[in-house]
Image: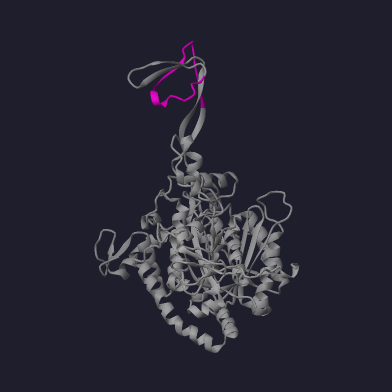
């Protein structure tokens, strides 16, 4: 009997804001919410963006003046909307109007006159080029004559052709919230995202450690492209060429699995299993697969799964632009040629399944906490849903490494069958929907819609709802499917599937048979959707699809497995857990929650371990780590 991986907490940050308590989801459907819910999310965004602060029991604006919260939030609403989701690139990360590049040039000697210049003595090359004639030019300077000419690099500036991106809320700077110590942006987001997820649990982490041995906790988290800004691998590659020094942190902080390492070392103090899968745009689902397998096998009781991607750097955007993958300003204007726009509509840059011209990069860090169903009952944990299964398949032989192939048909078919196995054929047909990869590219709209249309027909689905949240957030690469999952958890709380609102109409070449592309928000009711299928397609043929079950289905399964009395006990414990979750949310809305970042905290060494032949006891941990007492290969031994 396999343990059920139950989602008991989640958190993070993306262009829609903070994820915990469904705030990032609520930003997507803000105008469809009740006044109370909408105001809470506006307050959360306003504090993130530095527009409001809460001190000494009162709300104040950025100038330190006391304000009425409700009326101020209504006044701020246009700013909150303009400063979130996909929008024109801001210059807090880099100036898209001035991107540095170097152009090669040759200085030629003419009329028997050498190329002559003066240079500081310490700037002279270590290896003097052949033919240079050097003489003194005063204190600290040298005169150089080059008889034939020389090659140089000239400093130039260009404007980015792509000026749309899914950026974190305007004014939000994660490094201001803790001692960042020159961490790459992806790791700054990791600290925020993991902290948000852990504090959303409504449980003290220490109380979890009293129940779960250290080696039965695992963390799977990473990025698909590593940390490519200057503080990470970007600096490793650029520093010497820019005349700067490579620091001791550049290489170390650039590793793709560093988000998991940061969670272990500075957020949780985790001693259990750790690592990441690198699978391009399907990375989160690959990690999720690792986590649920740990829980289902019984080797681990609690898993933190996450991804953190910060790809908004000139180099990454240049790379995708050169591939023709991003929607640039010229293409965006062409899409709206009938409107005679003079300025591109950057907020509508990503148009999944419509007439489109490329995807839009976004940044995001998302973490979910899962545990086995027995532990969830024992802790009285929040139940946001459960992960039925995750399937991964490659494409086989390929003509182009970036083109789609057959693998995604397999993953989707498996995920749909697994969903039907739990909620029944009619449940799949009438009470499920799909979160599409939905990148906003011409190729994706055709190929992914064909997969959905074909398989919906196979499973007897007539009008399968299709959502695509990249239209709001952009493509966060490793975190893309994590964004999908976080949005899906919100659907089960508020009953609204976010529409593909940037798309005016479904494109003519999109396969629509058996499908319902949701171009507007769809109100379905919080308990009328039993499952969602998440789909991810990555470069190189990395395909993954996940079947995720609704909280009401999960609770029904737990009650059937553990009995009515155990379920009542869980409900009683839930009151305190839910209250602590609400308390954290209230503090976070006011900007008072703080991040978990424990540098040089309770560092363990060999002297803190008591080891014998049966177990290992660790200072600060109540549960001992048991050593293996048998072998699974007993039948093969004498």
Q: Is residue 532 above or below residue 446?
A: below
Q: Residue at x 60, y 85 (%)?
A: 560
Q: Is residue 527 above or below residue 455?
A: below
Q: Is residue 245 above or below residue 530?
A: above
Q: Residue at x 55, y 78 (%)?
A: 374
Using the rendered view, name the quadrant where residue 355 is placed. Answer: bottom right
Let me know if residue 575 is in the magenta part.
no
Residue 460 on image: x %, y %:
71, 74
Quadrant placement of the C terminus:
bottom right
Residue 429 on image: x %, y %:
66, 76
Q: Residue at x 40, y 78 (%)?
A: 579
**In the image, is 19 to the left or to the right of 437?**
left
Span colored in magenta: 105-129
Residue located farthest toward the top when viewing the structure as drawn: 112
Residue located farthest toward the bottom when viewing the structure as drawn: 565
Residue 196 shows up from this direction: yes
Residue 493 on image: x %, y %:
49, 75
Which of these two is toward me, 500 or 372? 372
Using the rendered view, name the quadrant where residue 179 is placed. Answer: bottom left
Residue 344 on image: x %, y %:
49, 51
**In the image, is 320 to the left or to the right of 342?**
right
Quadrant placement of the N terminus:
bottom right
Which of these two is toward me, 379 or 611? 611
């Amino acid at each position: 009997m396999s343990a059920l991986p139950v989602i008991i907490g989640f958190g993070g940050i993306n262009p829609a804001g903070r994820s915990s308590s469904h705030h990032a989801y609520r930003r997507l459907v803000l105008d469809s919410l009740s006044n109370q819910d909408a105001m809470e999310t506006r307050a959360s965004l306003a504090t993130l963006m530095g527009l409001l602060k809460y001190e000494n029991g009162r709300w104040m604006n950025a100038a330190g003046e006391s304000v009425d919260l409700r009326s101020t939030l209504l006044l701020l609403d246009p700013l909150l909307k303009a400063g979130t989701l996909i929008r024109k690139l801001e210059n807090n990360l880099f100036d898209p109007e001035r991107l540095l590049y170097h152009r090669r040039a040759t200085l030629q000697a003419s009329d028997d006159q050498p190329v002559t210049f003066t240079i500081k003595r310490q700037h002279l090359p270590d290896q003097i080029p052949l033919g240079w004639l050097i003489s003194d030019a005063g204190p600290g300077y040298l005169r150089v004559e080059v008889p034939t000419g020389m090659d140089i690099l000239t400093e130039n500036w260009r404007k980015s052709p792509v000026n749309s991106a899914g950026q974190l809320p305007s004014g939000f700077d994660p490094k201001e919230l803790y001692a960042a110590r020159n961490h790459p942006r992806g790791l700054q987001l990791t600290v925020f995202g993991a902290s948000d997820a852990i504090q959303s649990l409504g449980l003290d982490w220490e109380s979890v450690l009293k129940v779960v041995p250290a080696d039965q906790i695992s963390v799977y988290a990473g990025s698909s492209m590593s940390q490519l800004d200057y503080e990470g691998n970007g600096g490793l590659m650029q520093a010497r060429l820019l005349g700067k020094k490579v620091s001791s942190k550049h290489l170390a902080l650039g590793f793709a699995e560093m988000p998991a390492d940061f969670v272990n070392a500075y957020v949780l103090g985790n001693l259990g299993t750790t690592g990441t899968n690198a699978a391009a745009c399907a990375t989160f689902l690959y990690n999720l697969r690792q986590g649920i397998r740990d829980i289902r096998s019984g080797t681990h009781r609690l898993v933190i799964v996450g991804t953190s991607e910060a790809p908004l750097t000139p180099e990454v955007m240049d790379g995708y632009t050169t591939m023709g993958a991003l929607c640039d300003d010229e293409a965006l204007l062409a899409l709206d040629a009938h409107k005679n726009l003079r300025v591109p509509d950057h907020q509508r840059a990503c148009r999944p399944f419509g007439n489109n011209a490329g995807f839009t990069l976004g940044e995001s860090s998302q973490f979910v906490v899962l545990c086995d169903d027995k532990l969830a009952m024992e802790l009285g944990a929040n139940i946001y849903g459960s992960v039925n299964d995750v399937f991964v398949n490659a494409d086989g032989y390929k003509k182009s490494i970036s083109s789609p192939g057959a693998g995604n048909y397999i993953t989707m078919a498996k995920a749909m069958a697994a969903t039907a196995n739990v909620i029944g054929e009619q449940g799949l047909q009438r009470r499920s929907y799909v979160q599409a990869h939905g990148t906003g590219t011409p190729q994706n709209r055709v190929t992914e819609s064909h997969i959905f249309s074909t398989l919906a027909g196979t499973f007897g689905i007539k009008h399968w709802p299709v959502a695509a949240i990249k239209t709001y957030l952009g493509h966060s690469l490793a975190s893309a499917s994590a964004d999908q999952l976080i949005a899906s958890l919100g659907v089960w709380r508020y009953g609204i599937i976010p529409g593909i609102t940037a798309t005016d109409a479904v494109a003519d070449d999109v396969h629509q048979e058996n499908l319902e592309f949701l171009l507007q928000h769809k109100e379905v009711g919080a308990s009328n959707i039993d499952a969602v299928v998440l789909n991810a397609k990555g470069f190189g043929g990395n395909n993954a699809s996940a079947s995720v079950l609704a909280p009401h289905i999960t609770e029904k399964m737990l009650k059937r497995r553990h009995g009515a009395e155990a379920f009542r006990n869980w409900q009683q414990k839930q009151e305190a857990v839910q209250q602590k979750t609400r308390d954290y949310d209230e503090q976070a809305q006011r900007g008072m929650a703080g991040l978990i970042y424990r540098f040089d905290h309770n560092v363990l060494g060999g002297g803190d371990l008591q080891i014998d032949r049966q177990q290992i006891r660790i200072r600060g941990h109540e549960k001992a780590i048991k050593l293996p007492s048998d072998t699974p290969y007993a039948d093969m031994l004498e």
